[in-house]
Amino acid sequence: STHSRIELRRKSKTAENHMSQSNQMLW
């Protein structure tokens, strides 16, 4: 269960980076 939790956190962090990148492109 711990591994899946880390995986989920990593995925959410990747999504955050992608969102910030797209925001920078928009601005």
Image (tube, rainbow, N blue to C red):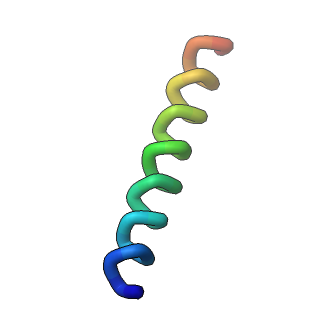
Residue 11 vs residue 26: left or right?
A: left
Image quadrant assignment for residue 27: top right
Residue 7, x across and y down, in percent: 38, 65
**Number of marks present in the image shown:** 0
- Residue farthest to the left, as pictured: 3
Residue 15's place in the image compared with 24, above or below, is below
Image quadrant assignment for residue 4: bottom left
Residue that appears at 44% across and 45% down? 14
Residue that appears at 39% across and 58% down? 10
Residue 19's place in the image compared with 15, above or below, is above
Residue that appears at 32% across and 77% down? 3
Residue 11, x across and y down, in percent: 46, 53
Image quadrant assignment for residue 2: bottom left
- Residue farthest to the bottom, as pictured: 1
Residue 26 vs residue 18: left or right?
A: right
Quadrant in which the N terminus appears: bottom left
Residue 26, x across and y down, in percent: 67, 13
Residue 6's place in the image compared with 22, above or below, is below
Residue that appears at 47% across and 39% down? 17
